[in-house]
Amino acid sequence: MARRIDLDLGERGYPIHLGAGLLADAGRLIGERLAAGPCLLVSDATVAAHHGAACAAGLRAAGFAPTTATFPAGETSKTVATAVELWQACAAAGIGRDGGIVACGGGVTGDLAGFIAATWMRGVAFAQIPTTLLAMVDSAVGGKTGVNLPAGKNLIGAFHQPICVIADPLVLATLPPREYRAGLAEVLKYGVIGDPAFLTWQEAHAAALAAGEPGAVERAVAESCATKARYVAADEREDGVRAHLNYGHTFGHALEAEGGYAIWLHGEAIGIGMRMAVDLARRLGVLTDPTLAARQDALLAAYRLPMTHPVTDPDTAAVRLAGRCRQDKKARAGRVRFILPRRAGEVMMVTDPPTEAVVAAFRSALGGPR
Ligand SMILES: NC(=O)c1ccc[n+]([C@@H]2O[C@H](COP(=O)([O-])OP(=O)(O)OC[C@H]3O[C@@H](n4cnc5c(N)ncnc54)[C@H](O)[C@@H]3O)[C@@H](O)[C@H]2O)c1
């Protein structure tokens, strides 16, 4: 049974459709929001090989005339150079002001295609068909689009909301298991920051989720999307409460950067970062439920996510990592912000905590070489 979650953003609001088999129906669902005509179907080459034909067929069946544009899979494609190629593809495909762009892929595809949609002809409609768990529960919802520069990730971008999101959990069957598990870290994040009942539900269904059991996955995606939709509706441009979605991210971004973006998938680094965030919360005396650390660890283990970041020199590495936090894109005017948990369902922002505490929190989840 398909579910629908509405992201309430007034005239920029949109439905998130979720259900097994919806990929074949994507053209019809997009057609409810956009007049049929030429559209650019953007995927990386891997996703195009698995799901491109089904997606294009659904679009054609609904009267659209899709032109497929692909790029090599991976974060290294999320560049201005790929954006130029996609703008040129828009020109070649005759995408006008009333045309559309359809992103079928993971977060890289969604961020790139969304950025093209935000900028082509000063903004055209785009639809998100996420094909990774991370994209379903996080990147496809909320309207953040962009590309990377050598100087940092996501430095160029725009807020541009999709006209709809269509998540079909069946497409996850082809996703590499490591990518799937990395997405579970974000699902766990929603369990900690959102409704405490969702954390309890994950504890009862951890094995089913780890195994990718369809019913459990669908419920987890629905709960996660609904939580993200609430935060985005309350604070579209991250001036306040939307920052709570960055739980674990200040630590995680430092770990990703330290590893040259080659050691960890994003979700893996966030999982370790959430352990460090609980440690920092405990050190600062803001953690009111001491059982949260063990509950979070148990779920990370059940999802077979890494628990520590490997280093040869933990003491000096912790100091170095704490220094990296100041370079985080989300540090404002040199001030470092951490989202820290108090208990399940309640987090708070702490700005510029004492450096010794941050160093110690990093140190708490650094391990020996892998
Ligand atoms: N916009 C946002 O709010 C937001 C939020 C979080 C992350 N992001 C961005 O998302 C990106 C990471 O997204 P991701 O983890 O989805 O990475 P990704 O798009 O690179 O996909 C990961 C890999 O899985 C493959 N893949 C995707 N779907 C598949 C499928 N169904 N079957 C087989 N293979 C498949 C891809 O080809 C790729 O190799 C980062 O660039 C990050 O900055 C954006």
Image (spheres, rainbow, N blue to C red):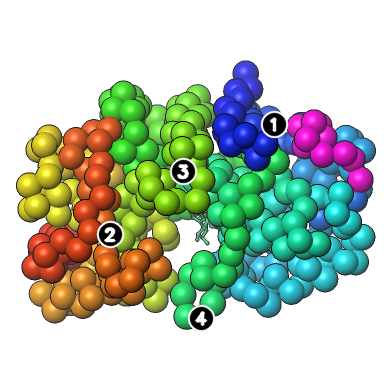
Task: State which mark lies toward you, 4 or 2.
Answer: 2
Task: State which mark lies toward you, 3 or 4.
Answer: 3
Q: Is mark 4 within 8 Å of ligand 1?
A: no
Q: Earlier in the sequence, mark 1 or mark 3?
A: 1
Please tell me in which quarter of the rendered image ligand 1 is found. Answer: bottom right
Kindly indicate whether the residue at mark 4 contacts the one at mark 1 (C-beta within 8 angstroms): no
Q: Earlier in the sequence, mark 1 or mark 2?
A: 1
Residue span colored magenta: 28-37
Please rate how many residues cluster around mark 1, counting C-alpha atoms within 10 Å: few if below 14, some from 14 to 19, many from 20. Answer: many
Whole-Å distance between the Cαs marked 3 and 2?
17 Å
Whole-Å distance between the Cαs marked 1 and 2?
39 Å
Q: How many marks?
A: 4
Based on the displayed image, in which of its 4 quarters is residue 270 positioned? bottom left
- Closer to us: 263 or 94: 94
Residue 22: mark = 1
Task: State which mark lies toward you, 1 or 2.
Answer: 2
Residue at left 60%, top 23%? 3
Q: Earlier in the sequence, mark 3 or mark 2?
A: 3
Find disc 3 in the rendering and name its residue.
Answer: 235
Residue at left 92%, top 38%? 63
Vertical order, 111 against 207 (above or below)? below
Q: Is residue 3 left or right of residue 360?
A: right
Q: Is residue 144 magenta?
A: no
Whole-Å distance between the Cαs marked 3 and 4?
29 Å
Find disc 2 in the rendering and name its residue.
Answer: 337
Whole-Å distance between the Cαs marked 4 and 2?
24 Å
Find disc 4 in the rendering and name its residue.
Answer: 150
Whole-Å distance between the Cαs marked 1 and 4?
37 Å
Where the N terminus falls, by quadrant? top right
Q: Tell me which amino acid carries mark 4.
A: Pro
